[in-house]
Every structure is written in structure tokens, then in C-alpha cells.
Amino acid sequence: MVLVFIETREGKVKKSSWEILGEAKRRAAELGVPTAAAYVGPAAECFSPEVFARGADKVFLLGNAQLAHYSAQGFAIALADLVRETSPQAVFIAATALGRDLAPRLAARIGATAASDCVKVEVRDGRLEFTRPIFAGKAFLVGRLRSTPQVLTLRPNVFAAVAPAADAAAGEVVTRAAAIPEGAVKGQVEAMIKGAGEEIDVTEAEVIVSGGRGMKAPENFELLRSLAAVIPRSAVGASRSAVDSGWIDHGHQVGQTGKTVSPSLYMAFGISGAIQHLAGMSSSKVIVAVNKDPEAPIFKVADYGIVGDLFQVIPPLRDELKKLFE
Amino acid sequence: MNILVFIKRVPDTESRVRASADSRSIVEEGLNFIISPNDEYAVEAALRLRETKGGTVTVISAGPDEATATLKKCLAMGADEALLVKDPLSETYDGLRVARIIAKTVEARFPGFDLLLFGKASVGADNALVPSMVAEMLGLPQANAVVKLAVEGSAGTAEREIEGAAERVSFSLPAVVSAQKGLNEPRYETLKGIMAAKRKVIPVVTLDELGLGGDAAAPQVEIVRIDMPPARQAGKIIPGTPEEAAKALAQLLRHEAKII
């Protein structure tokens, strides 16, 4: 069995969970084993037969009043008990903020190591072989885990979800109370604090419009936001120098000391392309660079480049893209 | 408050990395090593807590002899004590193994701690496994990748970034907290601190002494190979006025790249 943790937020299953369920389905078929999906705590309310159409053969709903708020401790206890009972070959968890918090705790609880942020999973000699970026993508580690089960976190935006088939057969649903000993949960999430807008994170965006030193001032990031506003599922990114200058919050930083991203389209405005920035974005499918300096290293990795003033390029680009998306 | 900070010596983020001839490791020769940037935020957080709550800050690194220099940097920043856990293996990418070493070190040497601080991930291995694994092994609550941290009495609160928002986590002490950019602005070493750190002898503990000799710390990650990313080819430079180029770019993205 390949067990997939289904992550929900505000009553909805995250897209990344459907992606890893799709990948679990494909690898499980190669291994000749079924796939199972686990919903923990209030996530159980998000259960719908869609999960079967998305690749699950079986569903576990693990409830307990102590799991009402997310805690790595509580969720790991619930999942570890399920793992001990069902002995899956592998456990897949999306490499989201929550997934990266939970997966290592679960792995340690079942005495297994783990591999984070995998971008490729293959079956070799009946075992899983993962590929994951190291040095933020300056190199890739291809490896296997000797411990079982194979606990992997999979990067969002990389794996294809299964398009739900209308005639998918419903599988078995197992509902059970997770046994959480009294006092075992010593820390938990109290509240979610939302920013001003409904922003998409750079790690989940399909398009990133990113600004660097060439943006010159914090207010000029409004121009990038106006461009992002016309592109569906897009986010604003930034280079380290823009963040360190205080022009934009560090949550937007792409690169080795920020976030590693793999969007379909990465547009770099006024970013020269320091090696630590290139490491974080060079696995993007298509890269666009706009920079005044024709010698900027970013042009060496860009599929499309415009040598020019970003302040003169962005407004007509925004208008043209707006027309295309309408 | 007794605070333990776990740090790692890693290649500078400006480094170009390349795989060794057997493709099983990264060539370390010629690389400049630094403290993992996330760990600096952890050291700074520890020093600030000591300033307001009193107590001691001990920095610990599991690694080669050369990690002594990294520990000395932390002493120069203001940490009270340091310990090197000598690890004969270079990077194993095995978080469970490192977490076992750290958990054993804490149990054997630091029974009365209040807080274990880490960087959210070591730059390089990028695994972000060790803090949560240590928390599980020691039965402690965890708060990872925090950008705000407050401790009052025997409880703490932290804020951590999640996709497009933040969440507030509350926990009891002792606890595991991992730090990231945004938590604080790490201080520089002082000249006085550097001189004092130079004279300090850093104690060393071996895996054998921790009861982790032989196969007890055998890596569980089999490194098949280390690949270099495919080199990207420089594409086309779009000519014309900014307006013409912008329009052409939009059309190319739709009709040639077919991504919008």
C-alpha cells in the first residue's frame, strides 16, 4: 500500500494533495499495491468520493477531539498508529509548510528516515528511488531509503493529479478514532493570521513575476503586483537584494536562502541572476528575463530575454497579457 | 533559561557545487564554509532570550573538526559554551541519523535544558528533518520555520509562515523551535568576542562515547548518485522598442512556449 496524507485548509483539499495522490497511484500500480488516503482530524469533513476518482482505493478517516487544531505531535501519533497497523511500503506527504512540519515527526515516530521535497519518484527493483534538489537545485540527489516505510515529501506543482473520472468506483471508507493519550500533545496551532490579500505562495504559483535590485524602490513592487493581478494563479517573487533592502517581505524571496520554486513561467525583472538566485528558480519550465544590462547572468538561463527598462516593458506586457487572458 | 542551539557548517551559498568523480558526494575542496544561514537566526534568538531571561546559551555542532571554527563564530557572537560532536561521516542526507546523534547528546550531556533551537533547514542538504525528528525522539513539542518567538514562564508562542499566511503556534517548554529569515537580524561578532573565542578550547564528544559506535549510526539513505541539473540554454533576445518587445513576448508565451 502507498499511503497518502490528505492536507486540507479551510474546508478544502489542497491541490498538492491531489497531485501526490496521482503520483502515488502511478507508483503503486508499478509496485502492484493499492493506494490509500488518510484524512486526519477535521479534514475528515472534507471527505468526498472525489478522492476515489483522484486515485485512492481506500480511505481512512482518523478523528479525535484533540486533533481539532493541527499539531505535528497529535497528527504524527494518529498516522503512526495507522502505519504500524497497515504496514504501507511508502507514505507520501506534500512538501507544504504543514507537510514538512509533519513528515519528519511521523518518520521518527515509526523509526524511519525521510527524504524531503522530492521532484521525481521511480520504481527500481521493486523499491522507490527519489530525486530531490540539494543546494536549492544546484545539484540533485538520487537516492533510496533503507528504512521502511519510505517516507517522502513531494514538491507541490511538480506531479500531475489524476483527472477525476466520472465513473470511478467508490472504495472502502474506514472511520476510526485516533488514540491520542491525554497530555501527549504539548503544542498546537492556535490561529491562522492572514495577510492583507488572498496571496498565493511562490511555491504554489504557476506563474511568478519576480523583482530584484532593478526595481529600485519598494513602491515599484506595485507595478509587479499589477502585472501579477492579470495572470491567474500567479505570485510576486523577489531576489535576496530586494528583500534585504526591505522592499518586500522575505516570504517572497526566491533562491538558496529563500524558497526554491518550479513554476511554469518565471519572469525576472531587474534581477541580475546571482548564483544563489539561479539555484532557486532554474527548474522553472520557462524563464523570461527583463534587464537593462545585456551581460546580466540571468540571460544565460532565460528562454526569452528583453534588454531594456523594466518600467517601460511591464505596462505594455500587462496590457497584452490581460487581453490574452480575457 | 538553558538554551541549546544546533548549528551546521555548510558551503557558502555563493558556491558553485560539483559532484565528485564517483558522483556520490559534493567536492568540498576549494569551497568556502559558513554557518548555515538559518542557524544564525537561531543563535541570535538564543542570545536575545538570554539577555531578557538570563541563563546560558550552548552551541553544538555534529560534524568534522573544521566545525570548531563555526562554533567559535557563535562564541564570538556571545554564546557561553560550545560542544563538537565528532562525526566521522561527511554529508549523509540522513535526517534520522543526525537527529539520533543530537537526541543522544542532549540526553547524555544536557538533562536540564529549556529550549532546543535549530535553523529550519541546513542550506545544502535542504531536508528540514532534524528539528522535528529530535522533538519526536525527546517527546517535545515543536514550532518550525518561525518568524516570531516569545517565551513566558514555561510556555512559548511562535508564528510560522504557511502558504500565503502565517499561523500562531503555542507550546509548553521544553520545546524544539527552528528559526528562519525574518525572525531577527543576527548580530556580528565583536572583536572582544573573537579574541575570547580564539582562546577557548571546545570540548569534543565522539559517537562511541554517546553509545552510537559501529552500526548504531549507519546511514539509512543510500546515495545512488548526485546529478547536476541540465544546463539551460540561453534563449532568444526579443528585439524592438519596449512596447514592441513586450507585445512580442506575450505572443511567444502563448503561441511558442504555449504556457499562457
Image: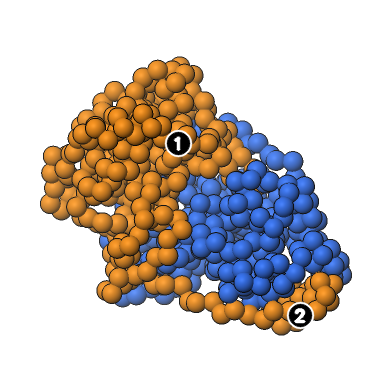
Q: Is residue A302 left or right of residue A152?
A: right
Residue at the spot 33% in from the left edge and 57% down from the top edge: B93
> Which of the numbered marks, if any, corresponds to residue B239?
2
Q: Amino acid at mark 2?
A: Pro
Residue A163 in which image quadrant: bottom right
According to the image, label 1 marks what residue? B188
Dot 2 and dot 1 within a common chain: yes
Q: Which chain does the numbered disc 2 sit on?
A: B
Nearer to me, A229 or B194: B194
Q: Colour of chain B?
A: orange
Q: Is residue A223 left or right of residue A153?
A: right
Residue A254's place in the image compared with B208, above or below, is: below
Q: Amino acid at mark 1?
A: Tyr
- Which chain does blue denote in the image? A
Q: Earlier in the sequence, mark 2 or mark 1?
A: 1
Q: Residue at x 69, y 74 (%)?
A: A305
**Callout 1: chain:** B
Please indicate, yes or no, whether residue A183 appears anywhere in the rendered image.
no
Where disc 2 sits, the SS reads loop
